[in-house]
Structures are given as structure tokens and as C-alpha cells.
Amino acid sequence: MKLQRRFCFIFLFILVSVSFLAAQNFNGLTYLMPVPAKIIKLEGKFRLDSAFSIAVFGNPNERLYGAATRMLHHLSGRTGYFFHQEIITKNSKSDSAQFIINCNHPGKLGLREDESYTLSISPDKVELSAETDLGDLHGLETFIQLLSVDSAGYYFPAVKIIDQPRFPWRGLMIDVARHFMPVDVVKRNLRAMAFVKLNVLHLHLSDDQGFRVQSKIFPELTELGSNGQFYTQAQIKDIISYANARGIRIIPEFDMPAHTQSWLASHPEIASAPGPYHAARNWGVHNAVFNPTVNRTYKFLDKFFREMTSLFPDEYFHIGGDENNGKDWSANKSIQSFMKKNKIETTADLQTYFNKKILKLLTKYHKKMIGWDEILQPGMPHNIVIQSWRGQKALFTAARNGYMGILSNGYYIDLYKHASYHYLNDPIPPDTMLGDEAEKNILGGEATMWSELVTPENIDSRIWPRVAAIAERFWSPDSIRNVNDMYRRLKTINYELEDYGTMQIKNYDMMLRRLTFNHDITALKIFVNVVEPVKGYERYNEGVYYNSSSPYTRVVDAAQPESETAREFNNNVNDYFAGNKSAEEKITGMMTLWENSYPILLKTLFSFLVLREMEPMSENLKNISEAGLEALTYLDKNQKPPDGWLQEKLNLLDKAKKPYGQCFLPIVPSIKKLVEKAEGI
């Protein structure tokens, strides 16, 4: 067995070497994400050299010139070419340019604008055409993804791509209220969003824990409700401009009437309970809520909306509207008297009353309301948008009743679900019987990054690369749903995202180095590579009570939401049972690595106090790896294990299922399959 394990290490070395050699022949056409609507493969290659140049024709705007210039610089950075052309402007209209961009007219950032494009690459020329510059922007991102390499140099495969999005609303929500995210975090995620053709960034700007936008009319909102962490209005304008340049809309959300404790720190006069209030530090649903029965609430909000609707240009304005538990309304005698006088039977009906008043204010300032499921109540106009967090049933009900909606249920990326789960979740699943009119009301969806458990240094790893898979669901035809192929492409896209400044790969090693005081992390990384954070809301129930001031620096905060190592191991085990001979070498090599790294890992774990919580899991990984290797030995020899062996190993596997440090081992079921197979089960 020791000789076999030695050969496994040699095999892994050869595997890495082969992967390196394969990387020298890379065809970008096979890694596109999102997959375009139509791809026509042609013969030949467009070879890239330093003479490459771009010309823009038609009726473009500065946004397109800027995007073309950024693409050229990106291309230069990827290849090391010193292009003769440096900046694309309206004067860059050379007939000799190798890349011609055509634009009929500038696009408007808004719902249902034309985002289609056609990209044609021949051995001699590249041509990108679109009705609007927004389509051209998407085409440029496809073009950069097509960059390929072989032994002769860099090239683009000859191809014709005719592309358009499946849904007009393709969004990402980032909660900057619970944990504030500085401008640079927002911008690098905007760059990544453009890369995968998302077009809406929804900023959750207020919650119980923080109010994050400067108000010049009510400066006390951030003075008492932000802990000094907020965006100035100049920064908001900069973010909006930055997003606009990449074809992305910014939707602001100011949550109300609940989730408002940070507002009430400075304005207790519009609260439903006497207070006093302060920005919350702990998570969960709080009782704080606006008083919807007094005029001063609406006078305050009228002034606030007048200021904020002029700051945010998008036609939609998000009012939240979720998770009002109604406790403060039920406990307030004046509010109860108001409800009785006005024949308002329930707190849900009172919130409908509030929403209708808010709608009038937003309409006054030429905005359309968007909110979570709870805002859909009888009597609401049909130009609002429902963001469904409760599920497709609520979304479909709204669509059938003539309301536009977007799906977020199933796209809660803060719950650490696998990319495959999100990828197969669909705003309009196959075989859905909605009817054409109702289907038109399903605008798309938004991935939601709630920030209770993320900070600026690990938020990217919670967003990317999984949101790239979600972006494909929003953009590509619904027939594109091969999970294995998605993962094959996602691995490459993850590295390409680094070119846009995302930190999901870079910060992983940094966080592990910090845990070891910058000592060698080799063994620790081998271990953390195979663990995952617990899923769903389980992390809130594991006995470690986080708040906004907690350290988010443990192993669970560094571990990836989905372990690529564990996924590959599990797939290899399935391949082994399907008769793939090479799969056995792979799983043997991986389990040998986990077993042999344990002594070094153990020393690392006991050297640093913050890591000791993971020691039981490290031992479990070693034990089940040994069990898996023993199982393979029995299977190879066609020999039945001794009496009691199966139960002993099942006991180890059962023990290994237990989470430690809010992490778990996702390989346990696969090793259990090996053990049971060895016993003949």
C-alpha cells in the first residue's frame, strides 16, 4: 500500500504537469460564460499582434469609446502586447482597423432596452454590431473571453455569435447596511458583473445596523446611524457613473417601515415605540418600525425621497417592505385606535396603508416602486415590481395578476449553497404553464448577498464564482443547463474574474496566512480546501453569536462556500463506480494526501489558538481517508473485510459528519460509498 501511495504522488505530479501543458493550448470558445444564444463555428483563427486596432462607427457615445479602450488595455494586459493604439475615440475611424464596432444609437439604462449584438470573427477581421451601445458592451466582454492561445501565440477562433439576453433584469444585490462595503469593493464587483453580463446592482443601503448614504437634508441619519461608515453623495454619484459606463443600473433600497432602527436613532419621533434607539449591533429581526399613522412620518419621508430620488436616476426605487413583525404596532394604543377608526383589521393591512402612501410620494418624484413580496397587496398599481424572496409560487401569482416580478428565492448566495443549486433554479422553470402575458411579467432575477457574515475581505468569495453561474441562468437560453459543463467553464471564469480585481482567490491565502502568523500554510490549505461552511441558516444556530463587531477571521470565514476539491473527489468516486480506471488513481491520491498531511497539519493547528477548534475535524479527515484507502485495497484484491470492520468505519464516518468550527466535510458520503462497496453492500 505504501508503494501504491508513492505512485499516487507521482501520478498527481504528472497530472499537474499535463494540466500545465494543456493550458498552453487554450480555446476560449469552449469556456464562454454566459453561453451565447447562437454560436456558428467557422474555419480559421484571427491572429493577434501589436498592430491590432479598433475603430467605432455609427452613432456611439462616450460609454462605448471608454468600454472599447478598457477592452484594449485588458487585452494588452492578458497578452503583454504593446499595441500601437492606446485610446479609442471618435477620431479612431480607420478603414484599416482590424476590429470594427458598429452602433446604431446609444442605449438607455432602463428596463427592456435592446442588449443584443452580433460578433463575427474571420481570419482577417473582427466585426461587432449592435442596435445600442449596451449590446456592444456585452459583445466586447464575449470577445475578451474568446482570447485563446497555442504554441504560435494568441488568437481568436473564427466564429459568428448572435446573442441576446433571456431576461431583461439580471441583478446582484449587495447588502452594504449590515456590514459596510467601501467604494472599491462595489467597483470591483461592478467590473465583474459586466464581465458576465449582469445589468442591475441593487444596493441595500439601510437596515437596523446602519444607514449608509449621506443626507444633506437630514445629516443626523449618518451621524447617529452609521458608525461613521457611509457613502457621501459624491461617492454615490461616482458609483452610478462607474456603473453606467459598464451598462449597469443602480437600484437603491431604503428598507421601510421595518428594519429601520438606524433611522430611528436620530428620528425617534417617527417610531412606533418610544425608544431610545441606536444602530443595532446584533443580527435578526428587530421590532423597530415607522409609525404609519402620523403625518410627521410622511412629511419626513417626503423630504427624504425628494433628495434621494434626485441622487439616484434609475426609474425604480426599492422600499424593502419585508419582515415587519408588527409587535410595536400591536403594542401602541394610539396605532390600535387609528386602525379601529379606519377599519384596518391587521398589521398587514396597516402596512398596505403605509405602502400606498409611500407610493404616492415616489410617484410624485417620478419613480416606480419595487419591494419584497410583502408589498403586493390588494389595490397596488401594476407598474410596481415584486422581488420574490418567498418563492416562485408568490412570483407566479403576481405575474398572473399583471404584476412584474423578479426572483431572488433560490439565489440567496449568503446561504452557501452550491453553484449547481443556483444554476438549476430558474425564474421560469421548464414546463411552467404561465401563458405568454404572465411570462412577460417575469423580468428575471437577482442574486442576494446579505452581509451578516461577510466583510470587505471575504465578500468576493461569497459572490464569485457562483454568481457567474446565476448570470448564465439569467442570460442564456433555458436549454443551457448541463451542470458538469457549467462547472468546467466556471473554473476558468473564476480565474478570469481576477483580471477585474475580484479577491476570491487572492484573499483566501491571505486569510490562511493570518491564521498562522504568516507561517507555512501548505498543510492547512490542503485541509481547508476540502471543508465547507455549514449551509442555510445553520451557522446562526451553532453556538457562536456574531454581531457587527465580531471577528470574521476564522477558518469558516476563509473556507469556500463550495469546495472544488470535494466536488472533484465526489465526482471521481462516482466515476470509479461507473468503471473509470483512472478515477481510482485520483481518489487514492487525494485520500493519501489528506492522510499524509495530517501530522504537519496537527502541529499547525496546535500552534495557533484560533485554529484549535478544527482539530477534531482534521483527525476525522485523516481517519476517513484511511478508511477509504482500506476500502479500495479490499476492492482491488476482491477480498472481504474482517468481521467488525464495516461497523468500525461507519462509526468513524458518522462521527465525521459532525460540524466543527461551523464547517463540515462534504466528502463523507462518497467515502461511505467506498466503505459499503468493500463490504459488498
Image (cartoon, rainbow, N blue to C red):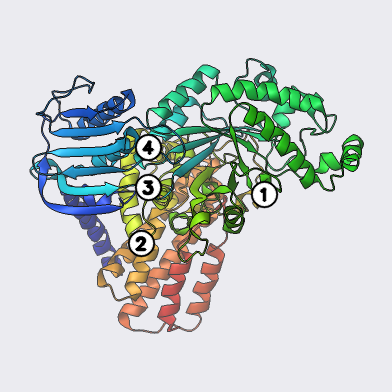
| Disc with the residue nearer the chain's start (3 vs 4) | 3
**The C terminus is located in which quarter?**
bottom left
Residue drawn at the location 45% of the way across and 53% of the way down: 562
Q: CA distance from mark 2 to mark 1?
A: 38 Å
| Disc with the residue nearer the chain's start (2 vs 1) | 2
| Disc with the residue nearer the chain's start (1 vs 4) | 4
Label 3 environment density (alpha carbons within 10 Å; few <14, some 14–19, many ≥20): many
Q: CA distance from mark 3 to mark 2?
A: 18 Å
For disc 2, the marked residue is 482
Label 4 environment density (alpha carbons within 10 Å; few <14, some 14–19, many ≥20): many
Where on the picture, by quarter, is residue 93? top left
Residue 305: % across, % down:
64, 25
Q: CA distance from mark 3 to mark 4?
A: 13 Å
For disc 4, the marked residue is 194
Marks 3 and 4: which is nearer the front? 3
Q: Is 338 placed left or right of 494 in the picture?
A: right
Inspect the image, locate mark 4, and give the three-letter code of the amino acid beneath it.
Ala
Q: CA distance from mark 4 to mark 2?
A: 23 Å
Helix, strand or loop for disc 1:
loop
Marks 3 and 2: which is nearer the front? 3
Q: Is 505 placed left or right of 540 in the picture?
A: left
Where on the picture, by quarter, is residue 385? top right
Inspect the image, locate mark 3, and give the three-letter code of the amino acid beneath it.
Pro
Residue drawn at the location 34% of the way across and 39% of the way down: 195
54 up-or-down from 589: above or below: above
For disc 1, the marked residue is 543
